[in-house]
Image: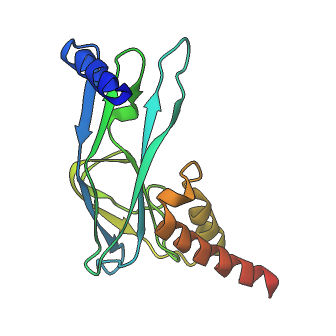
Amino acid sequence: MKRSLLFVVLLVLVFSGSANAYFKGPWKGKVIDAETKQPIEGAGVVAVWYVTHPGPGDSPASYLDAEEAVTDKDGNFEISSKFFFTIPNIRYIESGYPQITIFKPGYGSYPRYASSPRGYIKDNYFLDKVGVVELPKITDEKKRYESFVAAGAGEVPISKKTNYQKLLDIEWEYFHQKVSK
């Protein structure tokens, strides 16, 4: 009974123009080595959606949802389509697109260190098309550590980024071994 009432209320909001349905995606991309232009297999990709609740002054965005992917042997990944309800002047999806972070141990993370993203990418948003991201190998230890820290995706629950977290753990172990020598 409660579920059907909720469904009816949502339908009334949508059809009265008081709510919007957000449905976009999928987001596809390809990750390649910046120098060799070869695909990078096993890179972690996290897409994060934020919601904003307008109010007086700045309206900080807060975490809404996330999805992860891992690049295949050809460097390709796909984040599936998402569906959310929004209510104008009360809640909306920040920028309308997910923020994407890409990480592979030993490489510069996207967006901070990507040398030249190409395709349908605007700022940190993949706009419903295929984007090619070139990650540079990093040999400078300080930059490698900065890339690792920038790739954290800290607000995303670990249950939403299990494979991505494994890559971060590998990089953490790399730095831990360097310090303990």
Outermost residue, bottom direction?
A: 181
Is 94 displayed left or right of 170 in the figure? left
Of the 4 image quadrants, the one containing the C terminus is bottom right
Please, is residue 12 above or below residue 149 in the view? above
Q: Where is residue 7 in the image (x, y as percent from the top left)?
A: 29, 26
- Viewer-proximal residue among 34 and 151: 151
- Viewer-proximal residue among 83 and 36: 83
Is 52 displayed left or right of 145 in the figure? left
Q: Which residue is drawn at 24% across and 59% down?
A: 28
Q: Which residue is drawn at 39% across and 14% down?
A: 89
Please, is residue 1 above or below residue 39 in the view? above
Outermost residue, front direction?
A: 1
Please, is residue 114 above or below residue 10 in the view? below
Outermost residue, right direction?
A: 180
Q: Where is residue 125 in the image (x, y as percent from the top left)?
A: 34, 46
Is 17 displayed left or right of 145 in the figure? left
Of the 4 image quadrants, the one containing the N terminus is top left
Q: Where is residue 91 in the image (x, y as percent from the top left)?
A: 41, 23
Marks counted in the figure total: 0
Q: Residue at x 45, y 37 (%)?
A: 50
Please, is residue 68 above or below residue 50 in the view? below
